[in-house]
Amino acid sequence: MTTHERTYRSKYLEVLKRMTPEQRLLKAFELTEYSRQLFEQGLRRRFPDATEEELRLIRLERYKRWHSRNSY
């Protein structure tokens, strides 16, 4: 981790500590939605000719792979 990354992480943790539990939960929901949108945009960019149904199936397959990778 670089000095810049450590500084950024330290500031980020300070901000989180000042948040209420409700604010942290709302931030988690916001970041989850942002990640979902990035994922969706990436799929659309990678498969520009795919139909909505094809994208749905690709998305489900990716989710399945992630889930099985993170299962214990």
Image (cartoon, rainbow, N blue to C red):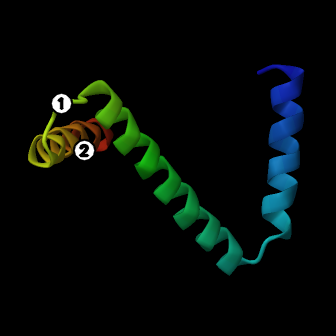
Which sits earlier in the primary sequence, circle 2 or circle 1?
1
Give the residue pinned by disc 1. Answer: 49
Lateral position of residue 57 relative to residue 63, left or right: left
Outermost residue on the front side: it is 49
Lateral position of residue 8 relative to residue 58, left or right: right
Give the residue pinned by disc 2. Answer: 63
Residue 44, position as x, y percentages in the image: 30, 36
Q: How many tags in the picture? A: 2
Disc on res. 18: none
Classify mark 1: helix, strand or loop. Answer: loop
Front residue (pair 67, 71) = 67
Q: Which quarter of the rendered picture does the C terminus lie within?
A: top left
When asked about the image quadrant of residue 20, the answer is bottom right
Outermost residue on the top side: it is 2
Q: Is 18 located above or below residue 8 in the figure?
A: below
Classify mark 2: helix, strand or loop. Answer: helix
Residue 64, position as x, y percentages in the image: 19, 43
Residue 72 visible in the picture: no
Q: Which quarter of the rendered picture does the N terminus lie within?
A: top right
Front residue (pair 39, 41) = 41
